[in-house]
Amino acid sequence: MLTNKKIGFGITGSHCTYDQVFPMIEKLVKEGADVQPVVSYTVQTVDTRFGDAEDHLKRLEELTGHSPVRSIELAEGFGPANPLDCMVVAPLTGNSLSKLANAITDSPVLMATKATMRNQAPVVLAISTNDALGLNGVNLMRLMATKGIYFVPFGQDAPFSKPNSLVAKMEYLVDTVKAALQHEQYQPIIMTY
């Protein structure tokens, strides 16, 4: 089902989830997808206890065979001239979530997503934010009600220590992409962690 599908894969700055995200990229590739990595400026420049930016970029290139798209100008190329079959953003931080919900396009990931939406191809979002049930709740609901946007199932990862936090269950990412390519939402969306 994924053979020769051109999948954009945007990564934003929720560094603590990369160990769950990179295996999903590998799985997409193994299932025959042509995965095109796109990275936010944070991914390109911030070193954390979860790894150095350059190491993440190298790993993305090794997994996909493509150099990550690092600029808005290059990401805009995923418009009508070079369309994606599907755009994935995993992890999607609360910052990028709020910008996407409010039509702000100030990073390569957001531009690639906007270009995909313009082409009316599916967009799959895997949220990872400490504020999804706080001020960002309205943005999450706006995107959930947007045609062509599909969510990797998510839940409260730490309901007592971080009651506003929601994180996607990345193990369902590939299944969500397959459903989205059929214009269906993988169910259930809300799961216990």
Image: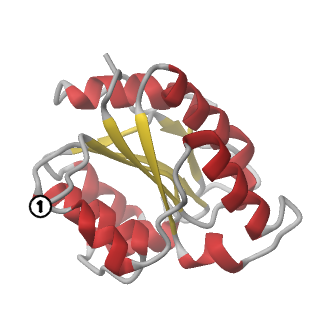
Say which quadrant the C terminus sits in.
top right
Pick the front one: 63 or 121: 63
Pick the front one: 17 or 136: 17
Quick one: SS at disc 1?
helix
Q: Residues within 10 Å of mark 1 (few under 14, many from 20)?
A: few
Name which residue lies at 34% across and 69% down. Answer: 75
Residue 111: x %, y % from top left? 31, 71
Residue 45: x %, y % from top left? 69, 79
Name which residue lies at 84% across and 61% down. Answer: 51
* Residue type, numbered disc 1: Arg
Pick the front one: 155 or 152: 152
The residue under label 1 is 118
Residue 144: x %, y % from top left? 26, 49
- Does the image show residue 37? yes
| Res. 50 image quadrant | bottom right
Q: Is residue 83 left or right of residue 30?
A: left
Relative height, residue 143 to residue 155 (above, below): below
Extreme-top residue of the structure: 1
Q: Is residue 171 left or right of residue 151?
A: right
Relative height, residue 35 to residue 67 (above, below): above
Say which quadrant the N terminus sits in.
top left
Name which residue lies at 40% across and 62% down. Answer: 137
Pick the front one: 112 or 180: 112
The colouring scheme, among rainbow, by chain, secondary structure or one colour, is secondary structure
| Res. 79 image quadrant | bottom left
Name which residue lies at 53% across and 61% down. Answer: 68
